[in-house]
Image (cartoon, helix red, strand yellow):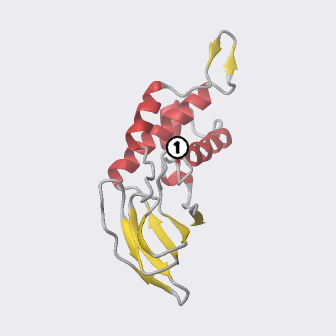
Amino acid sequence: MMPVLTVPPADPAGVVSMTQLRNHLRVNEGDDDALIAGFLAAAVQYLDGVQGMLGRAILQQTWVVTVAKGGLFRLPLPDVQAVTADYGSGAVPIDMMPSLVGADVDLSGPALVTMTAAMGAADRALAAVIVQMIVGHWYDNREAVNVGNITSILPLSAEALIARLRWRWVPR
């Protein structure tokens, strides 16, 4: 019952642009662009999706999960914009019922459930700050250990912001 990503998010630069990252890193245009782009992609991948540190979709993406029986099913992602169920004869839109721990859907039988999800603007802006902090940390500390300094952990400020946005699925 693990969700499968079927339509990935567009470009990681949709979270933070290279111009924003260069400004954050105080790097002149063109200097280390390939390295920074690699860190950007890795930071977004580290945070994004069901298995990312945030446990949720930053940019719009589509996930599918196979549900073995009918009844109430809690969607494994927050910020779901649209959901359909395919009972074997084609996908049909279904209504979500919000709850304190996520949205539920009422399925009439076994189904393939498809969800399109993306963070709202305020949470996406916070995710952008987290990505900049992570990229900045990785840019400044390119190895896990420097002489006399262990730098493999993220700064506490980034960890605090991650905790603020982190979502954990609580199945029904």
Residue at (31, 68) in percent of width and height: 97
Return the x and y of residue 43 as percentages of the image width and height.
Answer: 57, 42
Q: Is residue 159 above or below residue 75?
A: above
Find residue 36 and report its image quarter. Answer: top right
User: Which of the two residues, 155 or 85, is positioned nearer the viewer here?
Assistant: 85
Residue type at numbered disc 1: Met
- Mark 1: which secondary structure? loop
Residue under circle 1? 53
Return the x and y of residue 35 as percentages of the image width and height.
Answer: 67, 39
Q: Residue furthest top?
A: 148
44 vs 127, left or right, is: right
Q: Is residue 111 above or below residue 35?
A: below
Residue at (48, 46) in percent of width and height: 54
Return the x and y of residue 99 as percentages of the image width and height.
Answer: 30, 59
User: Which of the two residues, 105 or 166, is positioned nearer the viewer here?
Assistant: 105
Return the x and y of residue 135 as percentages of the image width and height.
Answer: 56, 36
Residue at (43, 63) in percent of width and height: 75
Residue at (34, 70) in percent of width and height: 96
